[in-house]
Image (tube, helix red, strand yellow):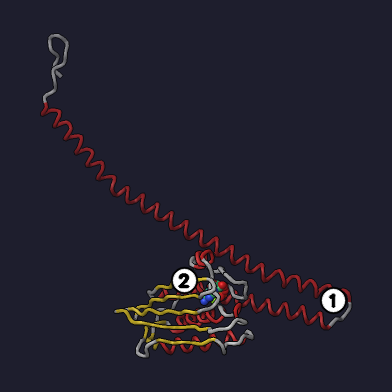
Amino acid sequence: MEHLVDGRTAPQPIADIFAGEQQRISTLKVNAHQLIPLEREVSVITDERASRRIVEKHFDMLVGGTVHNMRGLLTPIRHNVEELSALAKSGAIDKRKLGQHARAIVTRLADLEQFLDDMRAYAQPIPTQRRRERLIDLVREAADAARAYFEALGHDAAAIELRFRVPESLSVEVARHQVLSVFTNLLRNAFEAFRPIQDETGPFWIAVSATLDIDQVHILIEDNGVGFGEDDLRQIREFIPGNKTMKHDGTGFGLPTARRYIEGHGGSLDIDSQIQAGTRVRIVLPI
Ligand SMILES: Nc1ncnc2c1ncn2[C@@H]1O[C@H](COP(=O)(O)OP(=O)(O)O)[C@@H](O)[C@H]1O
Ligand SMILES: [Mg+2]
């Protein structure tokens, strides 16, 4: 900078200032450019952290639910075994009591086995081999199985009307066993939805309908059973095993497993329900 005779500095020529600013701007541009990959890296790390947090949350809930369920089964087993051992110690042979405790243990062990089977089914990978199946055949077979389960529990299925609106021409390419188990589970839930209202007068119905939409099949499984409210729906829609709205012998693996299997086929599954009105499960499957 030039110094004038009276000590003041001469104004810097505009061109110099301009050149200096341009230099600074281009340095900033270079720096900003270097920041872009860094920013991407940071967002990948943040995404990874977020996904890990979600996975950890699901894992915690799964473990928490599993421990809770296992405890619920093991505690009565332990209680009955202790009673049996007290009976043995006392030397009194009370056949009725012996039978009672033994039956209680057998029932709980069966529940425990069911729980382990459901857990395995949830974790099982879906076979990549697919076969073309007629949708109505899968639905009918699943409905028969669901009805049989319901009746085996001592309930009367006669008052529940089954309505199928599935075009005979519709077929899907699927891993048969898995998709059959999805429909069976959903229809079992639908039958079970009439358990709390069996003494009321109907009509009681379960409806399965399907429509083709370009390259997808939309399937609805609906019932006018007991349904459930918004808070339950929010929980059920997390599709984390163990969530149940009714106190009954289920394990809470049905819906989460169904959703996994359907997503494994490139499809989607969602549920909607209204208390005292009924429930609707919507499945979309590529054909
Ligand atoms: N169609 C339905 N009507 C009423 N409640 C249902 C229906 N489907 C599912 N639910 C509720 O959602 C819960 C979870 O269902 P699911 O995952 O199949 O487990 P589970 O049948 O072993 O209890 C059930 O316990 C039940 O309370
Ligand atoms: Mg179920």
- The correct choice, above or below, for 241 with respect to 287 in the image is above
Quarter occupied by the N terminus: top left
Q: Secondary structure at mark 1?
A: helix
Residue nearer the viewer, 235 or 207:
207
- The correct choice, above or below, for 226 with respect to 43 in the image is below
Residue 254: x and y in percent read 52, 75
Residue 150: x and y in percent read 58, 84
Q: Residue at x 49, y 75 (%)?
A: 279
Point out the residue furthest to the front here.
201
Which label sits in the foreground, 2 or 1?
2
Q: CA distance from mark 2 to mark 1?
A: 52 Å
Mark 1 = which residue?
Answer: 88
Q: Residue at x 85, y 81 (%)?
A: 94
Count residues near mark 1 (Cα–Cα under 10 Å), then give few for <14, some for 14-19, many for 20+: few
Answer yes or no: disc 2 within 8 Å of ligand 1: no
Residue 231: x and y in percent read 53, 63
Mark 2 = which residue?
Answer: 272
